Image (spheres, grey):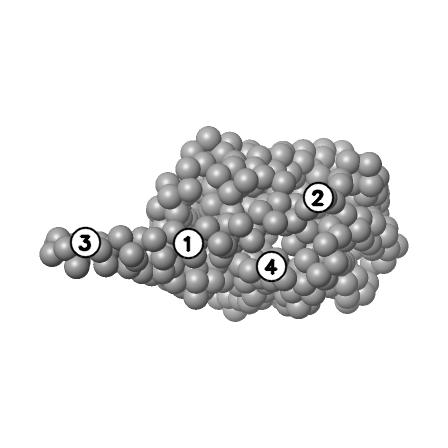
Amino acid sequence: MGFGLLSVFLPLYVVSEALKGSLFDIGIMSAVALFLAIPASLFWGYLCDKTKHYKRFILLSFSSSAILLYLFSLTTNVHLLILLYALMSSLHVAHEPPKNVLIAELYSRADWEKAFAFYEGFTESGWLIGLVLGFLTSAYAISPALTLLLCSVLNLVAFGLSLILVADPLLVFERSLVSIEKSTNFACYGISLASKLLDGIHVNEKLRRENVNAFCWGLVLFSLATSILFTPMPIFASQVVKSAALPSSLVFAVFVLNSAGGVLGYYAAGSRSERQKGKANIGQIVIFRSLLSFLLLAIAAILSPTAGTILLVVILVMMGFANAMFLAYTLSLSMELVPAGKAGLFNVLIGIGGACGSFVGPFIAAQAAGFIYVFLAAGIAFFIAYVAFKAF
């Protein structure tokens, strides 16, 4: 809830009269934070697998976020805010690898997609409530300091709940069993094909391992495209809402609907949790996101601002839906492909793309004095990601 509120509030706060920042400042803030989170994700992932203790890193993440968000409320210097945000990002990711491992170890492989979809959908509901809180704080003109303090309190509550509810597993072995199973199945399949060939049976099938490098590149490119698109999106949505002569608080409402699309997407991913179906759907999801990015170009050509606002909402809802299904499928696949000790690799790959895109998106928007080239760049990046996942 805290970070759902912060996701839209912070970019708008940076460019407000209080801080007098710019799109370039938003890009720098996001890029620095995400680049620092990359080695941090590897470090936390290695450390939690090495120690076999996961709860302590989740507690560290939420407690440090609560403290730093409180410090946010005490400053009106944009450069200090960027520094604090970067520090918070490297500590906040401490909960990501442990929670992925906890889900993988507490459920069998057959239930990973459903479990990850439920977790992400549940937390997306919190994100959605946070956006509703952002809408209310904006509508009632709550001061930025109080809004940031609310984010801090929500993270403090998360710390308290984790202290009570989260527990480390007694045994950690599910991922190792999955790795053994994959190797055994591959060997059995190879022996079966060889037997058919020796018996003179014509075989059309191929013995081929999954291309893990292509999967990794697909993750980076998908994250890059998403970050190019969504880092400056609150500013674009603000301009669209303003051109339609609607209240500025409706920017939060737009992202509430985007988040609602995500909740529906996680539900759909959980209900279609068969493993091979998930793999097949990844490419379709990515190309769908590419088409939606190109469709955003139409908003600039629509004469009616109201029609442009409606189109923006529809596209963001569908993007939220597609993104949720993508994350549920790729998260479960990453836990299958990534060996123990490298639990943070998924977040590293997402972070690399996100860090680059969070700088590139606002930079393109500022240099081109508009968002047309932002949507074009995102659409092309999504398409290249689709090619990588097809190779996987």
Q: Amino acid at mark 3?
A: Lys
Tell me which label, 1 or 4, sits earlier in the chain.
1
The residue lying at 11 percent from left, 56 percent from top is 200
As measured in the structure, the alpha-carbon distance from the residue carrying label 3 to the one carrying label 2 is 44 Å
Look at the numbered disc 4 and give the secondary structure of its residue: loop
Q: Is residue 122 above or below residue 377?
A: above
Sooner in the amino-acid sequence: mark 1 or mark 3: 1
Image quadrant occupied by the N terminus: top right
Q: Pointer 3: what residue?
A: 196
Bin the neighbour count of mark 2 within 10 Å (Cα to Cα): few under 14, some 14-19, many 20 and up.
some
Q: Is residue 47 left or right of residue 239?
A: right
Label 1 Cα neighbours within 10 Å, binned few <14 / some 14-19 / many ≥20: few
Q: Residue at x 75, y 37 (%)?
A: 137
Q: Where's residue 56, x and y in %?
A: 80, 51
- How far from the left and from the top, in percent, is residue 259? 57, 38
Front tag of 1 and 4: 1
First in residue order: circle 4 vs circle 2? 2
Give the labeled residue for mark 4: 340
Instruction: Name above or below for residue 222 compared with residue 260.
Output: below
Q: Which residue is mark 1?
A: 184
263 is higher (above) or lower (below) than 173:
above
**Could you give the CA–CA distance between mark 1 and mark 4, rounded to whole angstroms?**
18 Å
Residue holding disc 2: 169
What is the x, y in percent for residue 340?
Answer: 60, 59
- Alpha carbons under labels 4 and 2: distance apart: 15 Å
Query: Which secondary structure, mark 3?
Result: helix
